[in-house]
Image: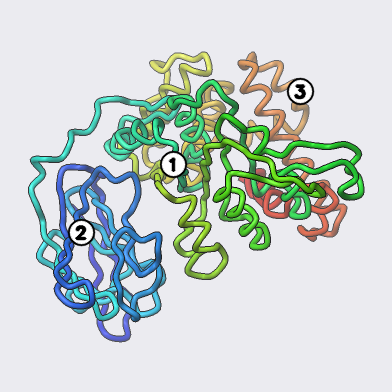
Amino acid sequence: MSRSTHAAGPGDDPATLRVDEPASSGVEFALVTMQGATKGETFSVDGTQPSRVLLGKGPACEVKLSDPHVSRRHAAIDVAGNALRITDLGSSNGTFVNGVRVLDALLEGGEMIRIGTTDLRVELRSRASLPALPAATSFGRLLGSSAAMRRLYLACERLAAAPVPVVIEGETGTGKEVLAESLHEAGPRAGGPFIVFDCTAISPNLVESELFGHERGAFTGAASTRRGVFELAHGGTLLIDEIGDLEPAMQPKLLRAVERAEIRRVGGEKSIRVDVRLLAATRRNLDQEVQAGRFRDDLFHRIAVARIELPPLRERRGDVAFLARHFVEQLGGDPAHLPPRLLAAWLGDPWPGNVRELRNAVARWTALGEIASRAPGGGDATAAALSSDPFAFALGASLPFPRARDLLVEEFERRYVEMVLDANGGDVAKAAAASGIGRRYLQMLRARSSK
């Protein structure tokens, strides 16, 4: 196993140990409490969990420690390769391994972890009872042949059939909405609606109306009664996208709706029962958001009955080539014609935009060939052609309809953001208000159009 280490002494920065092996379910570890209020308890961790296991004294923690010196969400553990990874979650008193404070460390067994006043011994156990990773290269429309993805498919199959709420975590572009829809389509509610509510795309003063609906005359502009997304999703699935961006004032109202399975429209007097399977997605670290007081602990506990973390593309060994060839074929090209030098460049790219960015790069190459193969992110030729006459470029490139539409939408977003910011002196808040969209959504469009 290859890794680099940096140990921290007193007064130094915490240690960071990392691994370059793919995630694996090949080992099982146990944490044995040696000291503290939970002395003698044993907690098992193997490579089949779809997300990290939380340690702390909060109600959402799988490893719950009754220790006043432990934070509500103190640390997280998961299996990485043949090691156990422990990550401090911004705790008040720190996480220590063999007396050294760490932020992110890989353990092989035999180490002693101290959290607060609680000591836990790490034990490596047999892998004989662990299920083998499936050979599948997809779950619904979620694609990937890497061990990191195949590890998720086991949990996805179980969660698709379960009625429990699920939180899907991952960086922008990792495929959170794709996974949510795949869970819906593989489950018993597949015949019902699948509704998406994006917390970043709605102005804060309209969020309650969008979620729960409103009665006619409830506020200025409410000319008719309107159903919210909870009612629209009745009998199916509701995905609340970017739930980490939900305004604090709305969080208790959402909690009430989820707990009671009923909503009340804005301006309404009666409660309406709703039968909805709730999924939530976020690019934010909700553990840290709860720790910082920006996200309610009770809401997190209610929606995170199950959690899935989608790994970034840079941690999915082998998936860049697999996905690139798939996207080329999907866009009407021949994967065999991918230039080896271009594919090699893509393999070495960190892909901060993840799968979405890779698909855009493939689409540029499909449209422009060697012009776009000069760099993983395409070249100035694409931008120049789009800027001069986007309709002529999209229509003249003989692109499939979805890709031609996407190119035009991307160019429209870029020009619109530039225009509305110029009109408001660069003030994002004023530009968002003038646009009728959420400030965070405008910022996302701005960041996307500047790539």
Quickly name the residue at label 3. 391
Quickly name the residue at label 2. 43
Q: Write the residue at 41% across / 32% down.
A: 160
Q: Find residue 60 and report its image quarter.
A: bottom left
Residue 88 drawn above or below residue 327: below
Q: On the rendered image, what quadrant is the C terminus found in?
A: top right
Q: Nearer the viewer, mark 2 or mark 3?
A: 2
Q: Write the residue at 26% across / 50% down.
A: 20
Q: Could you tell me which secondary element the residue under label 1 belongs to? A: loop
Q: Identify the mark at residue 164; answer none if there is no mark.
A: 1
Answer few, some or many: residues within 10 Å of disc 3's Cα (few below 14, many 20 plus, some between 14 and 19).
some
Of the two numbered discs 2 and 3 on the same chain, state the one appearing first in sequence.
2
The answer to whether mark 1 and mark 2 are in CB contact below 8 A is no
Answer few, some or many: residues within 10 Å of disc 2's Cα (few below 14, many 20 plus, some between 14 and 19).
some
Amino acid residing under circle 2: Phe
Q: In the image shown, does 229 or 368 lie closer to the viewer?
A: 229
Q: In the image shown, does 277 or 76 lie closer to the viewer?
A: 277
Q: Could you tell me which secondary element the residue under label 3 belongs to? A: helix
